[in-house]
Amino acid sequence: MPSSTPLPASASLTDPEICIDYPSEGVALVRLNRPEATNALSLNLQALLSEAFTALSADERVRAIVLTGGERVFAAGGDIKSMEGCGAIEIMQRHTERVWAPIERCPKPIIAAVCGYAFGGGAELAMHCDIILAGQSASFAQPEIRIGIMPGIGGTQRLVRAVGKFNAMRILLTGKPVSAEEARTMGLVSQVLPDDQVLPEALKMAQLIAAMPPLAAMQIKEVVLAGVDASLEAALMLERKANQLLFATRDQKEGMQAFIEKRKPEFKGC
């Protein structure tokens, strides 16, 4: 899939605030592109992300997605100027949960490649992903308390599930950032790399995942996310049923036959 391949026409993503590329077969790269505003998540940029992930979720050519903000900053939070004069009803009527749903519900594995600031909505955006690779310059924060509000796009709930109550409370109640290495130690970050290696490693990992049977990858993601909030007994049942279902796929037959024949499998996603 060449990098010039466009998104489906329905996406109509022509706004320069977001860039979509296809660097290798099965891999899509989504790049935030508001460097003059440290990739602050304006309403327009949020809408573009929603549109992009809606299109990528439906695109059968795409098997893994990398999300990045660039080498200097991931995303430095929401657009405070657009919120300063708002009342409660106006904020409610923005329905950010609907805007972010295509990212939250994307069936494809998403890798966040984070360099520089991932603050506020930027940290929440990274936590919508499945794997977070961070550069040594990366830092994560939920500073909303410092301006009299709190995270509103899942920051309190995803953070506590990732790092536990006591680390989450410290981050949420002080608003102070944590370094990439500290974030890795507490379980928020998958891996810390030199900044110039973050995106190449993310793309390499995405290429590896894209070569796997896509139905198995989607089932793994679905069961992991659904099982987090279920009882162990219910989660194990979900796992068993998903595993049983995969035995109805051609990719399962191809994978096992290729293993027996000591050859590289060719997964078709069916």
Image (cartoon, helix red, strand yellow):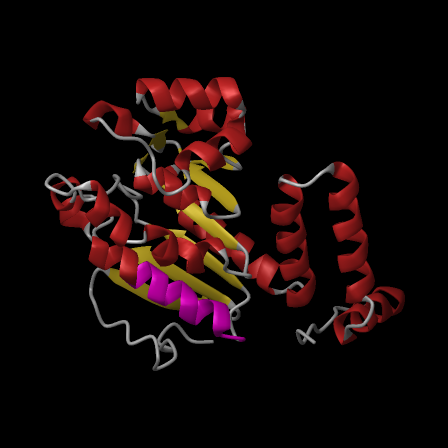
Residue 207 at what x, y percent from top left?
55, 60
Q: Name which residue lies at 63% across and 60% down.
A: 218
Q: Is residue 59 left or right of residue 225?
A: left
Q: Is residue 58 left or right of residue 47?
A: right
Q: Could one spot residue 197 in this view of the protein?
A: no
Residue 58 at what x, y percent from top left?
49, 73
The answer to which quarter of the image holds residue 84 is: top left
Our reading of the magenta stretch's main secondary structure is helix
The answer to which quarter of the image holds residue 210 is: bottom right
Total count of labels = 0
Residue 102 at what x, y percent from top left?
43, 60
Residue 261 inside the magenta-drawn segment: no
- Residue lying at the far right in this picture: please name it: 260
83 w.r.t. 173: above or below: below
Which quarter of the rendering shows the C terminus?
A: bottom right
Q: Nearer the viewer, residue 173 or 257?
A: 173
Residue 122 at what x, y percent from top left?
32, 41
- Residue lying at the far bottom in this picture: please name it: 9
Q: Is residue 95 left or right of residue 86?
A: right
Q: Name which residue lies at 23% across and 72% down.
A: 14
Q: Name which residue lies at 41% across and 43% down.
A: 126
Q: Nearer the viewer, residue 47 or 140?
A: 47
Stretch in magenta: 48-60
- Residue lying at the far front in this picture: please name it: 89
Q: Is residue 196 left or right of residue 211?
A: left
Q: Nearer the viewer, residue 38 or 115?
A: 38
Residue 52 inside the magenta-drawn segment: yes
Q: Name which residue lies at 81% across and 53% down.
A: 240
Q: Could one spot residue 223 in this view of the protein?
A: yes
The answer to which quarter of the image holds residue 38 is: top left
